[in-house]
Amino acid sequence: MSNHLDISSDGAPIKAWVRGVELDERALGQLRNVAKLDVLHGHVAVMPDVHYGIGATVGTVIPTLGAIVPAAVGVDIGCGMCAVRTSLTANDLPDDLKPMRLAIERAVPHGRSEGRKGGGKRDKGAWHDVPKRVGNLWKQHLADGFDALTEKYPVFKNSNHVNHLGTLGTGNHFVELCLDEEEHLWVMLHSGSRGIGNRIATVFIEKAKADMENLLGSLPDHDLAYFREGTQHFDDYVEGVSWAQDFARVNRQVMLENTIEALRHVKGLPRFTTAESAVNCHHNYVQREHHFGADVWLTRKGAVRAGMGELGIIPGSMGAKSFIVRGKGNPDSFDSCSHGAGRRHSRTKAKQIFSLDDHIAATSHVECRKDSGVLDETPMAYKDIDAVMAAQDDLVEVVHTLRQVVCVKG
């Protein structure tokens, strides 16, 4: 039996897995706007971490026929999660976890971009001198596609493309060390396509609005402007978004490997091994899939693919539990599940209503930053992850439950 609720709409049906979790009025309005799109196929699927976004809510799965809405994919193209289990256990960890956090911070550039437009040497969240291995991975996996993109769109050259490969970013992006139910240590991280993905998205969102011209007024929201399949800009966007999704996946893999290597040099930690393969999944992306009798362009904006037997990652906040899950392949959700807990309060509101003392208390069990710069990411800014998981028990089963012990934020 499906656990979703049916939400009233003047457009297509809306199926929402929101039993026991908040759904605010602004997000509800956005969902109803998306449901009015004339290119929608079937229904809109809403995950329990749903919250207000730009154009479309975060935590929404949108199937479209012969069209893609660039703003629904969003500006952090390919953002997602990566995690791997190590042979280390809680007993192997030192009493003071701060050296482990500092080692990760040295190995993974993080923080807000600064300096002139396009970043460069003054960008503290980028590599100042790109390591040889990172440069080789760029050449091996990404350089040819980037060259093809910039032949048509030279503006993309003015971005921190190579310098951001293997870097974290800011906001809700993180690297964490977690312990599972058997006390094994996991490395888990969250990031996407960084500055270049943002640039690609921004350019094409504006082009979609320009291409629709007089039809833009017929949309319930200008940010729902879309490209029609068969047009040049549609083909260019698919090329750009696919490349950015590849960048995001490689980016996470580089950070994961660099984090593991950094931990190998932490004094006092014993030698350890890692699982042969890591879970590496997008949760802001679009791809071709078959659902309800049609080949559609499926956009997961803050949602993870959860096909039958497929592994995914659902993180909580920086002080709550996270989960490695296995998909149940629920067709009504388009084989999807939530991508996290979902925000309860905006970044601005979180900084207004929570104090530094609140944050320190909520993260007392985690080695992490405890300053005003991360108040917008404090655990109380997010929904109850247990309620979110209960609302989608027909979408995924829990394989591992993780609790954070170290967290690095940008």
Image (spheres, rainbow, N blue to C red):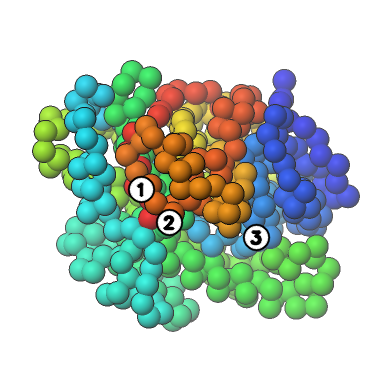
CA–CA distance between discs 3 and 1?
A: 29 Å
Amino acid beneath label 2: Gly
Quarter of the figure with residue 187: top left
Q: Quadrant of the N terminus?
A: top right
* Position of residue 43 measured from the top left corner of the image (x, y, whole percent): 76, 43
Q: Between residue 290 and residue 3, name the one nearer to us.
A: 3
Q: Quadrant of the C terminus?
A: bottom left
Residue 54 is tagged as 3
Rendered residue at 27%/75% (across/down)? 121
Residue 369 is tagged as 1
Judged left or right of residue 22, residue 7 is right
Q: Residues within 10 Å of mark 3 (few under 14, many from 20)?
A: some
SS of the residue under disc 3: loop
Quarter of the figure with residue 217: bottom right
* On screen, residue 347 above or below 210: above
Does residue 389 appear anywhere in the picture?
Answer: no
**First-in-chain label (2 vs 3):** 3
Judged left or right of residue 347, residue 373 is left
SS of the residue under disc 2: helix
Q: Residues within 10 Å of mark 1 (few under 14, many from 20)?
A: some
Residue lying farthest to the right in this orientation:
10
Q: Between residue 126 and residue 317, name the one nearer to us.
A: 317
Rendered residue at 65%/60% (across/down)? 54
Whether the residues at callouts 3 and 1 have beta carbons within 8 Å, the answer is no
Amino acid beneath label 3: Ile
Q: Between residue 379 and residue 110, name the one nearer to us.
A: 379
**First-in-chain label (3 vs 1):** 3
Whether the residues at callouts 2 and 1 have beta carbons within 8 Å, the answer is yes
Q: Residues within 10 Å of mark 2 (few under 14, many from 20)?
A: few
- Residue designated by label 2: 373
